[in-house]
Image (cartoon, rainbow, N blue to C red):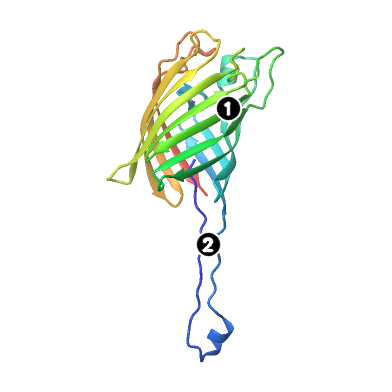
Amino acid sequence: MKTLALAIGALTLCGSATTALAQSAPATAEAASPHTFTANVTLASEYRYRGIMQTNRRPAIQGGFDYSHASGFYAGNWNSSISWLNDSNDEVSAPIEMDFYAGFKNTFGDGKWNYDVGVLQYYYPGDYPANFTRPYTTELYAGIGYGPVFLKYSYAPTNLFGFYDSKNSWYVDLSANVPLEFWGLTLNAHVGYQKVQNVSDASYTDWKLGLTKDLGNGFSAAVSYVDTNAKRGVYTNTSGRYMGKATVVATLTKTF
């Protein structure tokens, strides 16, 4: 999700000391606010998370809200339509993913280095059968980056996305977003490893390669190739679709 900075301009009135205008309207300047509020909405050809399909190859509508402070503190909410829970169990009805997060990020070393630490709660409101392991997941994360490269580690003290007895699972990913010198494009590359604790054959690696284009006026478009080596025996839904299959995902985002 992009952050759209809010700027407050400074207006300075000047003139001859002999004019009434200059006497009644001295030069003034208003300090920029330390608070930033943004919102975003995305249309996606499908929703993939850590390489695994979330909408069974169907389009998704997504969006959220973010607050950030000049100190580095931030908090927000992001939401997406989903179908993977119902696709994996006909007795489940949970059509929405709601993410709530807060953290602190900043730069150091003349701005070349950056870090991000925080907590993220995945919430899936819906109807679940008795004895069903709820998919609600909490992750603590910490990351450090240099220039366009960022390394992040996420740890789940809760069960992970509905896997029974999967506490203490973790995910590590390395990403790079490199501005290119033509057409205003940014190259996006990513590789990650999901460790699912105590669940045989559920751990896997995912990777992505794509491009993002800033279209101006808060719009951006992205296209990416996504793939995994997730085991079919674990990641196949009730309709027989392999949820980790390679695909191309396209998105259009508007940031306010």
- Percent across and percent down for residue 62 are 54, 36
In this rendered view, identify the residue nearer to me: 77 or 238: 77
Residue type at the position of mark 1: Glu
Residue 156 falls in which quadrant of the image? top right
Q: Determine whether the residue tagged by mark 2 lies in a helix, strand or loop.
A: loop
In this rendered view, identify the residue nearer to me: 108 or 5: 108
- Percent across and percent down for residue 5 are 50, 52
- Percent across and percent down for residue 206 are 42, 22
Residue 72 lies, with reference to residue 141, above or below; the image says below
In this rendered view, identify the residue nearer to me: 151 or 199: 151
The dot on residue 29 is none
- Percent across and percent down for residue 211 are 35, 37
Q: Is residue 57 visible?
A: no
Q: Is residue 9 left or right of residue 125?
A: left
The dot on residue 8 is 2
Residue 85 lies, with reference to residue 140, above or below; the image says above
Which residue shows up at 48% across the image and 33% down it?
143
Q: CA distance from mark 1 to mark 2?
A: 36 Å
Q: Is residue 190 visible?
A: yes
Which residue shows up at 65% across the image and 18% down it?
92
Name of the residue lying farthest toward the bottom: 18
* Residue at which label 1 appears: 139
Q: Determine whether the residue tagged by mark 1 lies in a helix, strand or loop.
A: strand
